[in-house]
Image (tube, helix red, strand yellow):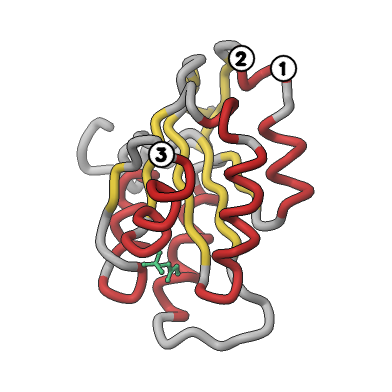
């Protein structure tokens, strides 16, 4: 048994990057500005501010990652309000909020959310024909854990 969710054409895209990966995310986002412009963009604080400046597109900015932004995105995922996360996390530097980073990655997997953690994966996803269409995903059946209907 699984829960079926329809992902609409206009997708809710979460964008997050660690400090040494922000330039990579900015380069990718500027390169794909036209494609991103058709979607709702949500980001952790510093990443969002940078992307808004570079893209000149509206970005919903949450708290900075270490101050709760990663957890806010995790919460949006659990509530079914994120369709894709592009998270350029840094494999070469320990983060003070590593527990939050792990929690966010864990929830994205738990809820079967599309996730790209590097440019190649982000390119594949963004150029997929499914980005311009509705499609259906299934999430595992967590009904035994849930105390309320999502
Ligand atoms: O720390 C982050 C992700 O773990 C990102 O946070 P900022 O976008 O505020 O830098």
SS state under label 2: helix
- Between disc 3 and disc 2, the foreground one is 3
SS state under label 1: helix
Quarter of the render that holds ligand 1:
bottom left
SS state under label 3: loop
Q: Residue 114: image x %, image y %?
A: 59, 40
Q: Tell me the distance, in whole angstroms, between the alpha carbons under discs 3 and 1.
A: 25 Å
The mark nearer the N terminus, 3 or 1, is: 3
The image quarter containing residue 31 is top right
Location of the N terminus (image quadrant): top right
Does the image show residue 72?
yes
- As drawn, the label of residue 132 is 2
What's the residue at 78%, 48% (across, down)? 120
| Residue that badge 3 annotates | 56
Q: Residue 106: image x %, image y %?
A: 51, 60
The number of numbered badges drawn on the structure is: 3
| Pointer 1 local density, CA inside 10 Å: few below 14, some 14–19, many at least 20 | few
Does the image show residue 74?
no
- As drawn, the label of residue 129 is 1
Mark 3 and mark 2 in contact? Answer it, CB < 8 Å: no
Q: Quick one: 98 or 37, which is closer to the camera?
A: 37
Mark 2 and mark 1 in contact? Answer it, CB < 8 Å: yes
Location of the C terminus (image quadrant): top left
Please identify the residue farthest to the left as the structure is shown: 148
Q: Quick one: 91 or 79, which is closer to the camera?
A: 91
């Amino acid at each position: 048994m699984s829960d079926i969710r329809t992902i609409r054409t206009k997708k809710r895209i979460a964008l997050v990057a660690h400090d040494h990966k922000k330039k990579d995310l900015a380069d990718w986002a500027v390169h794909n500005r036209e494609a991103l412009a058709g979607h709702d963009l949500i980001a952790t604080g510093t990443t969002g501010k940078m992307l808004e400046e570079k893209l000149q597109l509206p970005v919903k900015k949450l708290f900075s990652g270490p101050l709760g932004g990663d957890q806010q995105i995790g919460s949006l995922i659990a509530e079914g309000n994120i369709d894709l996360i592009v998270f350029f996390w840094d494999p070469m530097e320990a983060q003070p909020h590593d527990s939050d980073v792990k929690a966010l990655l864990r929830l994205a997997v738990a809820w079967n959310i599309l996730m790209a953690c590097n440019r190649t994966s982000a390119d594949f996803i963004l150029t997929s024909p499914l980005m311009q269409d509705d499609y259906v995903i299934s999430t595992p059946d967590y009904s035994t854990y849930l105390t309320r209907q999502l």
